[in-house]
Image (tube, rainbow, N blue to C red):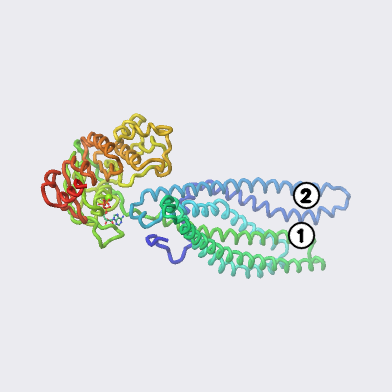
């Protein structure tokens, strides 16, 4: 468990109540399932009574005709038919509910995750979220879609069975009750233990999946450093620990089952012995004893089924609790309740950093940016330069409001970005990030991610502008070529050009380029640069770059060092000075 998600000291059974909002829309289905449940339970209970009639009356007709017996058997078959139909209907309805609820639950959790801020994902492993989405929701499904109804059916059978036992033989029933009371105690005690162990074992499964998710994404690095054995051992350790935890749970459950079954059947055997004695002494009819045996069997079976279901319900309570934690996760960054509408500036967005200081949440004592004041006019292109770790990319993260500033304010078109809706803010920004992201889809849909409703022609035009058209055309299926997971079938420079095309397609008033051309050869860079020059017209552009060929085209250059702005000016002005920029330029030209 990562530290940020609070784990309640005692997992509460009440966690299941959180499933109610997911069940509530399906009240009609629940009612129907309940009706089928009642009918099938009732039919089950009628069977032994029919047997009693058959044994006591069917066989004692004595007239040699079989009419009576025929009727009883016909009746029995009729009851079986009702039982079959009601059971099937209940099964269908309840399974439907289970599948439906879990589908809704998965969507709800996923929706919640999509809205989480960077901070959430810095502290939560995606593998763990995935495991919760699959394993935990499946547990919930088991309960809603079967255990709960089995448990309810058993409960009805139990209650009905008890009642019928009482009717059949009051004396034997009272003795049975006394004995059954003894069974409840171990269920309660062991049930608690099962629940605790269940959460534990789920956590370990999540642990292992988180690790596998990370490592499978980094296979080339693992193999290049020949760390396969190490990774194998690490994974084994986690799954083994999951196994041990599961076995501890299973052991508790096995003990629970043993205790319950032994006690229940012990009681039954004892009661039967009493019954047999009563029949021999003529205090009870053979049919009544037969019915009693059947009812006792039904009742005992239902107790067994109830403990089974109870175990499942407890496991699901643990799972629901974990899912609830995800559902309750609130984003650290959120749109204001009453966002200010964004104004449009025709010559591109104006951007202002006003005394901005920022600490990453994971490093509260280290300022990644300190007292940054920077005003950028609409349509201006500004290059951010400086050594690695100076805080350049952090500027972009703040503009996109992936994090909120610690002090100061950022304004776009004169409006504080915290007063805008996140959607409006991010809609007006196009970014080519330092690490390009390619989805496992074809080239066309990867570029179209910048503007979902773009036509094929618009996509191709954007690809042309990003110098991506030619290499895409040469791929086996052109724009329909699958690029592999994370774009593994492309070179670094090709991935970058796809990302640039995506940003160009979005056509935003504010364009952020974070070393967008760093992986390109000089010629492609020149061509992409020219395309960007065209794209930059009528919009504001912030460019992070190390190569001076890129930097010197900007209207203004801002040099960063250790989270502070140390110089601003044009290429010529800064080069003439003796500051950071002149120093860096000298190094590069010397090379
Ligand atoms: N998510 C994060 N959590 C904590 N610290 C971070 C995080 N991202 C960056 N930092 C730290 O903030 C500082 C600035 O990082 P930033 O990514 O802005 O550097 P940069 O100027 O873009 O460097 P580069 O040229 O290498 O990309 C660095 O010291 C870095 O270690
Ligand atoms: Mg960076």
Q: Do the residues labelled 1 and 2 touch (CB within 8 Å)?
A: no
379 shown above or below 175? above
Residue closest to the eye, 225 or 486: 225
271 shown above or below 67? below
Regarding residue 418, the answer to whether it shows in the image is: no
- Residue annotated with mark 2: 72
- Which mark is drawn over residue 39? none
Residue 330 in the image: state x and y as whole percent.
36, 54
Residue closest to the eye, 531 or 295: 531
Q: Report the residue at 36% width, 51% height from top.
A: 116
507 shown above or below 81? above
Tell me the SS state at disc 2. Answer: helix
The residue carrying pointer 2 sits among few (fewer than 14), some (14 to 19) or many (20 or more) residues within 10 Å by Cα, namely some
Residue 231 in the image: state x and y as whole percent.
46, 57
Direction from residue 299 to residue 116 in the image, left or right: left
The residue most toward the top is 457
Sequence order check, earlier mark of 1 and 2: 2
Q: Quadrant of ligand 1?
A: bottom left
- Mark 1 or 2: in front is 1
The residue carrying pointer 1 sits among few (fewer than 14), some (14 to 19) or many (20 or more) residues within 10 Å by Cα, namely many
- Residue annotated with mark 1: 290
Quadrant of the drawing holding the N terminus: bottom left
Query: How many numbered circles are shown?
Result: 2
Residue closest to the eye, 414 or 67: 414
Q: How far apart are marks 1 and 2 (CA)?
A: 16 Å
6 shown above or below 65? below
Tell me the SS state at disc 1. Answer: helix
Direction from residue 255 to residue 273 in the image, left or right: right
Residue 158 in the image: state x and y as whole percent.
64, 60
């Amino acid at each position: 468990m990562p530290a940020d998600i609070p784990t309640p000291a005692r997992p509460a059974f009440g966690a299941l109540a959180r499933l109610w909002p997911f069940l509530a829309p399906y009240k009609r289905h629940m009612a129907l399932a309940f009706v089928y449940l009642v009918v099938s339970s009732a039919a089950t209970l009628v069977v032994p009574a029919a047997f009693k009639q058959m044994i006591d009356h069917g066989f004692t007709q004595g007239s040699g005709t079989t009419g009576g017996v025929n009727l009883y058997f016909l009746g029995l078959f009729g009851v079986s038919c009702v039982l079959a139909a009601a059971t099937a209907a209940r099964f269908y309805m309840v399974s439907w509910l289970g599948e439906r609820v879990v589908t809704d639950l998965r969507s709800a959790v996923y929706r919640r995750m999509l809205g989480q801020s960077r901070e959430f994902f810095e502290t939560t492993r995606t593998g763990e979220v995935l495991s919760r989405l699959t394993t935990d929701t499946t547990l919930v499904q088991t309960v809603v879609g079967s255990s709960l109804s089995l448990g309810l059916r058993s409960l009805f059978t139990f209650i009905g069975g008890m009642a019928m036992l009482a009717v059949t033989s009051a004396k034997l029933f009272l003795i049975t009750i006394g004995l059954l009371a003894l069974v409840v105690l171990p269920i309660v005690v062991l049930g608690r233990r099962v629940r605790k162990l269940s959460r534990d074992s789920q956590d370990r499964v999540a642990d292992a999946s988180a690790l596998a998710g990370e490592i499978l994404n980094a296979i080339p690095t693992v193999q290049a450093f020949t760390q396969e054995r190490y990774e194998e051992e690490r994974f084994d350790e986690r799954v083994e620990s999951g196994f041990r935890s599961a076995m501890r749970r299973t052991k508790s459950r096995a003990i629970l089952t043993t205790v319950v079954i032994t006690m229940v059947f012990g009681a039954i055997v004892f009661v039967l012995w009493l019954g047999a004695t009563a029949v021999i002494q003529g205090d009870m009819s053979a049919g009544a004893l037969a019915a009693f045996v059947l009812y006792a069997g039904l009742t005992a079976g239902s107790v067994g089924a109830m403990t089974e279901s109870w175990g499942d319900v407890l496991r699901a309570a643990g799972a629901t609790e974990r899912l609830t934690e995800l559902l309750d996760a609130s984003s650290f960054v959120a749109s204001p309740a009453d966002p200010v509408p964004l104004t449009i500036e025709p010559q591109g967005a104006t951007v202002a950093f006003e005394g901005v200081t920022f600490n990453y949440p994971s490093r509260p004592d280290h300022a990644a940016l300190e007292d940054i004041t920077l005003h950028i006019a609409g349509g201006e292109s500004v290059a951010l330069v400086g050594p690695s770790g100076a805080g350049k990319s952090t500027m972009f993260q703040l503009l996109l409001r992936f994090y909120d500033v610690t002090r100061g304010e950022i304004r776009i078109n004169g409006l504080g970005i915290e007063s805008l809706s996140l959607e409006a803010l991010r809609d007006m920004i196009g970014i080519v990030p330092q690490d390009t992201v390619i989805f496992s889809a074809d080239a066309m849909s990867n570029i179209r991610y910048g503007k979902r409703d773009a036509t094929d022609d618009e996509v191709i035009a954007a690809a042309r502008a990003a110098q991506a058209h030619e290499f895409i055309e040469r791929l086996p299926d052109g724009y329909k070529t699958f690029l592999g997971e994370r774009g593994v079938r492309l070179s670094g420079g090709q991935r970058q050009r796809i990302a640039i095309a995506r940003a160009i397609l979005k056509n935003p008033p504010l364009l952020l380029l974070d070393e967008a051309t760093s992986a390109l050869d000089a010629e492609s860079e020149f061509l992409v640069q020219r395309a960007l020059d065209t794209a930059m017209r009528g919009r504001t552009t912030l460019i992070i770059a190390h190569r001076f060929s890129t930097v010197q085209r900007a209207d203004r250059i801002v040099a960063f060092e250790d989270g502070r702005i140390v110089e601003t000016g044009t290429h010529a002005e800064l080069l003439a000075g003796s500051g950071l920029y002149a120093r860096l330029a000298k190094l590069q030209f010397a090379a």
